[in-house]
Image (cartoon, helix red, strand yellow):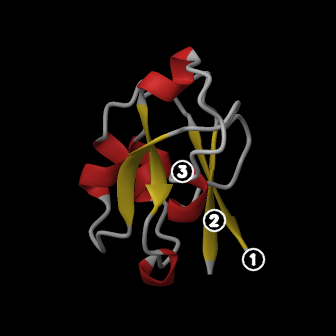
Amino acid sequence: MFKLKLNAKNCISCGICMDVCTLHAMAMGTNFSKSIEGKNLTNLYLNSKDNVEKLPEQMMTFPYLAYPQLCDGCANCVNECPVTALELQSD
């Protein structure tokens, strides 16, 4: 199984990574916590609404592995990212 690590400072929320995922394992989600820098993003993490403080990164959508079981590690998302904001890691 693979994890997607995001460099939020680089991400421009363009969605190219999601578009090139041929297995449809990725989605875009809004962040509701204080910081997402360097986090392994999952659906559960992105839908946590524990923090109501609105930081700039909370007003953007970010890529995450919605279906990590579908990810085969091809790294199309990483390779096609125009701002090198993603890193794919294996468990």
Residue position marked by numbered label 2 in the rendering: 3
Q: How far apart, in angstroms, are the residues tagged by discs 3 and 2?
A: 14 Å
Whether 77 is drawn above or below 16: the answer is: below
Q: In the figure, 61 relative to 23: above or below?
A: above
Sequence order check, earlier mark of 1 and 3: 3
Q: As shown in the figure, which amino acid type bears the numbered disc 2?
A: Lys
In which quadrant is the C terminus drawn? bottom right
Locate residue 80: give its quadrant.
top left
The vertical placement of 8 against 2, above or below, is above
Q: Residue furthest top?
A: 56
The answer for how far apart the CA atoms under marks 2 and 1 are is: 7 Å
Q: Quadrant of residue 76?
A: bottom left
- Counting residues from the start of the chain, the first of labels 2 and 1 encountered is 2
Q: Residue 5: x percent and y percent?
A: 65, 50
At a point 55% along the width and 20% down the height, the residue shown is 54
Of the residues shown, which amino acid type is indicated by label 3?
Answer: Leu
The residue indicated by pointer 1 is 91
Q: Which mark is residue 46?
A: 3
Counting other residues with Cα less than 10 Å from the Cα at mark 2, is it few (<14), some (14-19), or many (20 or more)? some
Quarter of the picture containing the N terminus is bottom right
x%, y% of residue 33?
A: 65, 37
**Image-quadrant location for residue 85:** top right
